[in-house]
Amino acid sequence: MSSDKHSNNGRSGKTGGRIIVVRHGKPNLDRNAGPRLNWREYRDWWAAYERASLVDGQTPPKRLLHVAKDAPYLFASVRPRAIETARAIAGDREIITDEVFVEAPLPPPNWSDRRKYLPKTWNLIARVAWMLGHADGDEHISETRIRADKAAEKLIAASGDHDVVLAAHGWFNRMLRPALKKRGWVCRRDGGDSYWSFRVYEKL
């Protein structure tokens, strides 16, 4: 069954809890900004991005707040940008952090130091290289797929008869989709991959 970008907040009328997977808000480290970096400098930039907080003054979209309102608690990656996103959604609800939800790594290929690009370009280069098997000491794609399976199982186990919300990361959120699908969960609403976007899954 295909996803529906225009459904009513992903609610099909079925009983049982939904899994709502959210991408974090906008970080305060801009991937579009210069200077251009070589691969070593990009590796340091990515490490700083992993430590980055959100840009001040952001608020979650009203639609996200509405769809997440019935979840008794929220899950989040251990990265600051994910935790701060969860806090903005949660209000006074509990937030449970777990390393299983962190982003898929972005190890850059070890090219000549003369080759310099903006971080956003390195993001693309590193993601393609990683998908082709480049790891350079980081988590291999096969290991991340196993982690996505574990993350899906954790969310499913927590869902029961109530909604579950996860604040995590763009690429890892994508990897959750097939992990949930093979366990009988369908994406009822696909909000894409922009900051604060979300997908809603229901059990078939």
Image (tube, rainbow, N blue to C red):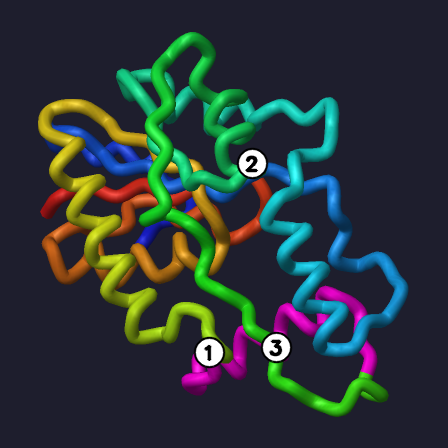
Q: Residue at x 72, y 33 (%)?
A: 55
Judge left or right: residue 176 versus residue 133: left
Q: Residue 161: say if magenta.
A: no
Closer-to-camera residue (146/112) = 112
Q: Which residue is mark 1?
A: 135
> Does label 3 or label 2 sit earlier along the sequence?
2
Marker disc for residue 108: 3
> Does label 1 or label 3 sit earlier along the sequence?
3
Judge left or right: residue 28 versus residue 145: right
- Amino acid type shown at disc 3: Pro
Indicate the secondary structure of the residue bearing disc 3: loop
Q: Are marks 2 and 1 in contact (CB under 8 Å)?
A: no
Residue 195 appears in the figure: yes
Q: CA distance from mark 1 to mark 3?
A: 8 Å
Q: Which residue is mark 2?
A: 80
Q: CA distance from mark 2 to mark 1?
A: 24 Å
Query: Which residue of the protein is positioned furthest toward the bottom in this rendering?
Result: 112
- Amino acid type shown at disc 2: Pro
Magenta residues span 116-135
Residue 195 spot, x, y in % from top left: 59, 43
